[in-house]
Structures are given as C-alpha cells and as structure tokens.
C-alpha cells in the first residue's frame, strides 16, 4: 500500500478523477468581508476577454431576445465600440468592492466617460478593477455646467456612465436633473442595478417590509426637520432615513421626542464592511447607547411605523427642554415657539403660554395677558 496522502478528486464528464496536485484555496482580498467564502472570491483585476464580454452582453436583460453582438448595450458608438449611446446609471458597492456586477464592470470599462460625485473616492474602485475610462466630477457645485457638457456628449452619440460614491445613483445623490434632461430629449437612460443601502438595510432590519417610506436625509433647518419628522411619526409603515454619523445623537433625540421613546428602530452601520453593525432597540434606548460616543461610517436608520393612535403631544417637560435648547442657541421666544409647535403635535398657544411662563419678564407677561 502506498503511504502517499490521498489527493482530492474532481468530476469530469461523469467520472471522478484525482487531481494531479493538491488544491490550493485562493487568498482572500483584504477588501473582502470576513464572511466571504474563499471559494467564491475571484479577482476581476484582469481585463475581460472578448468571449467573456460577449457572454456578459448576452445575459443582460436588454439583450435576452437578441444575439450577444446585437444586444441593446452594443452599438458602434462608444469609444470601444461596445455600447449604444445613452446615460448609464451604474450601481457601485456600498462598502465591499466585491459587491459589483459583471455587467457594471463591463459598462464602466466600455463607456466614453464616467461621471462621479467624488472622483478621488471613485478612482479607488476603478483602479482596483483596472478600469481606465476617463473620470469627471459631477456634484452640486458644477451640476449645471456638467449637465450641459454631458448632454452635448450624448447628442454626439457617446455612452456616459453615472456613478455615486456608493450604491445606486440619483438616490439622495446628484443626477436627477440630468435624468430629467435626458428624458425630455428622448436620450436613453439605462439602469445598471446593483447595491443599495436602502434595500440592504430594509431586507435585514426585521421591521415590516411590505410597505415603507424612504425619507432620506433630513433638512438642516430645525423647523423643516421637525415638520418632516412629525409627518413621518404618524405613518403606519416603516420609515427609512440616511443619517450622517455626526448628527446621529441629534436625530435620535428629536425622533425620541416626536415618535416616542418606545418606538422600535434599527441602526445599520458600515454595511458590507469589516465592522458591519446592526443595532436594534427602542429610540429611548438608542439615545442612551449612542450618547457615549459618535459612531463611524454612514448610517441607514429605520423606525417602525405607528401601531395605533397618532403621535401624542409631548409633555410639558419635553416642551420645556426643546424651548430651552432653542433659546440657548440664540433664537427669540417667538421663533422658538414656532419651531417647537411646527415640529411637534403640541398646540402653538400652549407652547407660547409655556414659553412666556418660563422666559418672559414680568412686565412682558402682564402686557401679554392684557392684550
């Protein structure tokens, strides 16, 4: 009997054949999440071969009914002669660089130009996959100018890809006006679906998913923000917000006051990354937990819908806290009353009476009662 160790087998045409050398598991990319199986991880750093590109094209949704060479993505218009002219909305990873589709890579490689909100951030993704397509900035400071030059490119038959810093473009990111302009001129707008923080958080939150409202980022103005939160608090479906980490505690404090401390919430942070976290509890508990320090990474926050009765008016102590906070920041009594009344279910006259009792000078109180 041989003392050599047994080698693993593989199957070929129904027969089990021994491998000629031990099978080695490929190394995992440093960018891969810890839960990614080594056997599923493959690097796409090498450019696609012609046959690979052809297979990708034939499997795309718009090319199912035609041969790969006649796919709707394919027309001799782009710089590499593989894409038809149009605006391609390409979803990119929200954290883990492996979460990008083969089709997205092909579009990014073949487009004439790529528009990105932050070119420094997007360059890392393109470099990782050896994509040399020209990259141009497209953000709120150059939005109008870039839209005009992009329309000119599209009219001349070019293929333009639009990506965001992470996830699906146009969702709480620049691009809506460009899409509108394209549709008005009958320029093709082609979605290349993929990662989305909204859907990723919703699917894992454990809150009802049959109906939901995506609120996105809240306004900076206190009155507008409170008004938006009051409207959301009265909805019976799951509410989804994007929250910058430095504003998390402020958000939790305001929602705890308006939604109620007992309302369930889920805080999804660093999704698909190494330190991915899903925190679950009530809004009141969240305030206590996150008061100790500011978390890192972009946050998607979900709050359960209203179960039965509409949002209740806050207590007098809660109103006093809000009024004192606003007045300490330099707001006048009348402005503070307006903001609190608009942002809560409290009646304005009740808030005003409380404010006069707390902050008005004696002569002002008498004057108010005599008027």
Image (cartoon, helix red, strand yellow):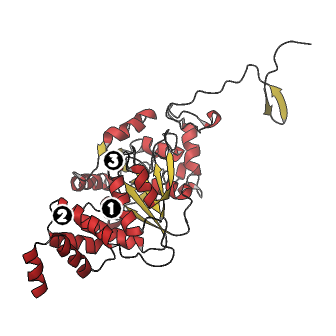
Tag 3's secondary structure? strand
Tell me residue 109's x, y (percent).
44, 40
Residue 42 is left or right of residue 131, and the answer is right
Tell me residue 51's x, y (percent).
58, 38
Does the CB distance between marks 1 and 3 fall below 8 Å?
no
Marks 3/2: CA distance? 44 Å
Does the CB distance between marks 3 and 2 fall below 8 Å?
no
Does the CB distance between marks 2 and 1 fall below 8 Å?
no
- Residue at the disc numbered 3: 115
Tag 1's secondary structure? loop
Residue 49 or 325: which is nearer the viewer? 325
Is residue 272 positioned above or below 190 on the image? Answer: above
Q: Classify the position of the N terminus by image quarter.
A: top right
Is residue 38 positioned above or below 83 on the image? Answer: above
Query: Local crowd at mark 1 within 10 Å, few (<14), some, or many (≥20)?
Result: some
- Residue at the disc numbered 2: 327
Q: Classify the position of the C terminus by image quarter.
A: bottom left
Residue 370 or 256: which is nearer the viewer? 370
Mark 3 and mark 2 lie on one chain; the one further toward the N terminus is 3
Mark 2 and mark 1 lie on one chain; the one further toward the N terminus is 1
- Residue at the disc numbered 1: 218
Q: Can you name the residue that lies furthest to the front here?
A: 362
Mark 1 and mark 3 lie on one chain; the one further toward the N terminus is 3
Residue 40 seen anywhere in this rendered image of the structure: yes
Marks 2/1: CA distance? 22 Å
């Amino acid at each position: 009997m041989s003392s050599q160790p047994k080698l693993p087998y593989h199957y070929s045409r129904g027969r089990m054949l021994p491998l000629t050398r031990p099978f080695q598991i490929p190394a995992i990319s440093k960018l891969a999440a810890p839960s990614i199986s080594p056997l599923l991880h493959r690097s796409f750093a090498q450019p696609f071969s012609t046959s690979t590109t052809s297979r990708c094209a034939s499997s795309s949704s718009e090319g199912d009914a035609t041969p790969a060479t006649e796919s709707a993505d394919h027309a001799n218009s782009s710089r590499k002669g593989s894409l038809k002219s149009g605006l391609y909305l390409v979803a990119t990873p929200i954290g883990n660089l492996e979460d990008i589709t083969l089709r997205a890579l092909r579009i990014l490689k073949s487009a004439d130009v790529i528009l990105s909100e932050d070119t420094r951030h997007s360059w890392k993704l393109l470099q990782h996959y050896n994509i040399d397509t020209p990259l141009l900035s497209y953000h709120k400071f150059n939005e109008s100018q870039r839209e005009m030059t992009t329309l000119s490119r599209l009219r001349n038959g070019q293929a333009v890809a639009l990506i965001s810093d992470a996830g699906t473009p146009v969702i709480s990111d620049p691009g809506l006006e460009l899409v509108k302009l394209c549709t008005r001129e009958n320029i093709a707008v082609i979605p290349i679906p993929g990662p989305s923080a909204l859907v990723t958080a919703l699917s894992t939150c454990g809150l009802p998913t049959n109906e939901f409202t995506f609120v996105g980022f809240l306004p900076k103005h206190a009155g507008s923000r409170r008004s938006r939160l009051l409207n959301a608090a009265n909805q019976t479906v799951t509410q989804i917000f994007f929250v910058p980490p430095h504003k998390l505690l402020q958000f939790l404090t305001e929602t705890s006051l308006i939604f109620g401390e007992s309302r369930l919430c889920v805080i999804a942070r660093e999704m698909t990354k190494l330190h991915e976290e899903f925190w679950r509890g009530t809004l009141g508990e969240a305030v206590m937990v996150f008061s100790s320090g500011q978390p890192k990474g972009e946050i998607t926050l979900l709050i359960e819908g209203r179960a039965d009765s509409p949002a209740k008016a806050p207590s007098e102590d809660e109103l006093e806290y809000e009024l004192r906070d606003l007045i300490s920041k330099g707001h006048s009594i009348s402005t503070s009353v307006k903001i609190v009344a608009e942002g809560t279910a409290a009646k304005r006259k009740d808030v005003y009476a409380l404010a006069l009792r707390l902050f008005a000078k004696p002569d002002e109180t008498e004057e108010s009662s005599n008027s």
